[in-house]
């Protein structure tokens, strides 16, 4: 573990009750002020811009994917607040991690590079394009083309040799988990495809989004009442499902479904989106109404480093959904408001009395669990309240400026993706959980969430 730097050590000092963040959920200035404090706390964990360190990497024990997720939060932070404080380190990190095929596949990450890991960086680039985050200069790939390159490299990995299709968790055969087809990898691919469809209008992306959705439903990675499970072993042809439920699986599917509804306006996607939102009730406490928690691990104290960030992505994508599918507003915003207020109350630890813990259901008592995931989750749920202050994600016909390259990443594949005719102007890691996953496949009933 490398977290020995003074800024990080200061964050780890527990002094509960010293402060807490004053958040008034109906006051824009208060929300921005709270987000500013939490964002500074998140920034303190990042060392990649320091001399001798690597831009786009977090110190141990964090995996590469979570750094991409963190910079997505900083893109969102700029979008919601207008504060440019973290723009420079965001651009530096995202450019440094582009890697092979301009598709976020850096060679030094191959030992842990999964489809979900790559996709979290791809979703950060997609958010940058949608939010009109300034594109890189000096001939670097646009944010949109980076997301398209991730899509193209992943579409080429669609694997019909088992389970009738789907993406494997891992990209390379030598990595543990290669024979696992997990929901987050496929869900992120769905998410990127749907959002690219919304941005470009190209039907090829819609076709892939529908294909992934139908495959996940057929295999049983999602239930008929829109609960999302962890994954399945493709060596058993996906006949057994690990039924652990994680909040980020619901989040990536919710926002993808919202993007599909936004473009099509059809009842099928409206029904699906409504079902996903209703299905997230499992992640909101009944004893502390409307307050978000990670149902599989938070109450029993078993959340690992990765899992402590998952609420960030549910909160992020609930806010996105409320904005682009306005009829969902009353279903979503009360949950975000209650969760944000609860999160702020327990951001009362550390040297400054504003470090955020994991458990928002503790009625203001900080649980002493600190880190990137805890801080990022608090930031995302707070800044998601600023939906009325922003115009919403753009597309090529609605003010988008990021340059499209439908063939981006194509040099990585033997059979390039064939795109439909252009009609409007022109593809998570979620952690190194191999041991947990393999145990879960055999004993998933223990973890079953009804």
Image (cartoon, rainbow, N blue to C red):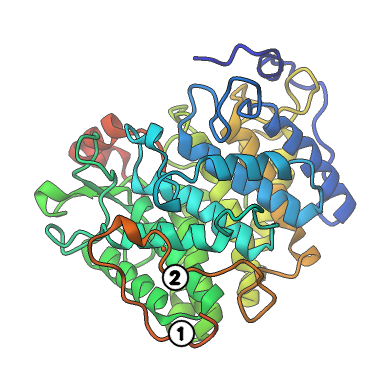
Query: What percent of the width, then of the height, locates residue 442?
Result: 18, 38
Vertically, is 380 above or below 308?
below
Q: Residue at x 69, y 32 (%)?
A: 43
Quarter of the image where one finds residue 415? bottom left
The residue under label 2 is: 406
**For mark 2, does the 10 Å Cα neighbourhood hold few (<14), some (14 to 19), or many (20 or more) residues?**
many
**For mark 1, does the 10 Å Cα neighbourhood hold few (<14), some (14 to 19), or many (20 or more) residues?**
few
Tell which of 347 and 104 is nearer to you. 104
Tell which of 368 and 73 is nearer to you. 73
Q: Is residue 195 left or right of residue 400?
A: left
Q: Residue at x 64, y 33 (%)?
A: 362
Helix, strand, or loop for circle 2? loop
Q: Reading the chain from its start, which is encountered first: label 2 or label 1? A: 2
Query: What percent of the width, then of the height, locates residue 388?
Result: 78, 66
Do we see residue 338 in this rendering? no
Q: Residue at x 48, y 66 (%)?
A: 256
Marks 2,1: beta carbons within 8 A: yes
Helix, strand, or loop for circle 1? loop
Q: Residue at x 51, y 55 (%)?
A: 123
Q: Is residue 428 left or right of residue 317?
A: left
Q: Is residue 117 left or right of residue 47?
A: left
Vertically, is 265 above or below 212?
below
Q: Which mark is residue 422?
A: 1
């Amino acid at each position: 573990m490398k977290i020995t730097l003074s800024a990080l050590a200061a964050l780890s000092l527990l002094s509960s009750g010293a402060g807490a963040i004053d958040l008034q959920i109906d006051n824009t200035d208060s929300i921005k002020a709270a987000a500013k404090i939490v964002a500074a706390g998140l920034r303190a964990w990042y060392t990649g811009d320091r001399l001798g360190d690597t831009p786009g990497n977090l110190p141990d024990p964090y995996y590469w994917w979570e750094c991409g997720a963190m910079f997505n939060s900083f893109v969102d932070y700029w979008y919601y607040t207008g504060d440019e404080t973290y723009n420079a380190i965001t651009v530096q990190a995202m450019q440094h991690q582009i890697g092979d095929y301009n598709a976020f596949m850096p060679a030094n990450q191959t030992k842990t590079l999964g489809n979900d890991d790559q996709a979290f960086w791809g979703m950060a680039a997609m958010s940058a394009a949608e939010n009109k985050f300034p594109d890189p200069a000096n001939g670097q790939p646009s944010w949109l083309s980076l997301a398209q390159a991730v899509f193209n490299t992943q579409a080429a990995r669609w694997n019909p040799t088992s389970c009738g299709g789907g993406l494997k968790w891992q990209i390379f055969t030598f990595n543990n988990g290669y024979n696992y087809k997990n929901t987050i990898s496929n869900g992120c691919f769905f998410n990127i495809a749907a959002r690219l469809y919304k941005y470009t209008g190209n039907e090829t992306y819609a076709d892939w989004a529908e294909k992934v959705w139908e495959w996940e439903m057929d295999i049983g990675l999602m239930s008929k009442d829109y609960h999302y499970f962890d994954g399945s072993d493709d060596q058993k042809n996906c006949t057994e499902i690990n039924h652990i439920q994680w909040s980020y699986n619901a989040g990536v599917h919710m926002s993808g479904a919202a993007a599909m509804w936004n473009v099509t306006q059809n009842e099928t996607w409206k029904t699906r989106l409504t079902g996903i939102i209703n299905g997230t009730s499992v992640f909101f406490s009944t004893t502390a109404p409307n307050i978000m928690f990670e149902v599989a691990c938070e109450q029993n104290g078993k959340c690992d480093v990765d899992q402590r960030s998952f609420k960030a992505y549910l909160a992020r994508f609930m806010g996105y959904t409320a904005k682009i599918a306005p009829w969902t507003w009353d279903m979503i915003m009360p949950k975000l408001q209650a969760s944000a207020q609860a999160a702020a109350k327990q951001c009362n630890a550390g040297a400054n009395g504003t470090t955020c813990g994991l458990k928002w259901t503790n009625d203001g008592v900080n649980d002493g669990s600190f880190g990137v995931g805890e801080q990022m989750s608090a930031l995302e749920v707070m800044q998601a309240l600023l939906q009325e202050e922003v115009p919403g994600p753009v597309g090529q016909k609605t003010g988008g400026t990021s340059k499209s390259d439908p063939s981006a990443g194509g040099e990585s594949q033997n059979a390039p993706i064939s795109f439909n005719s252009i009609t409007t102007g022109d593809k998570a890691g979620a952690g190194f959980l191999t041991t947990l996953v393999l145990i879960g496949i055999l004993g998933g009933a223990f973890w079953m969430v009804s």
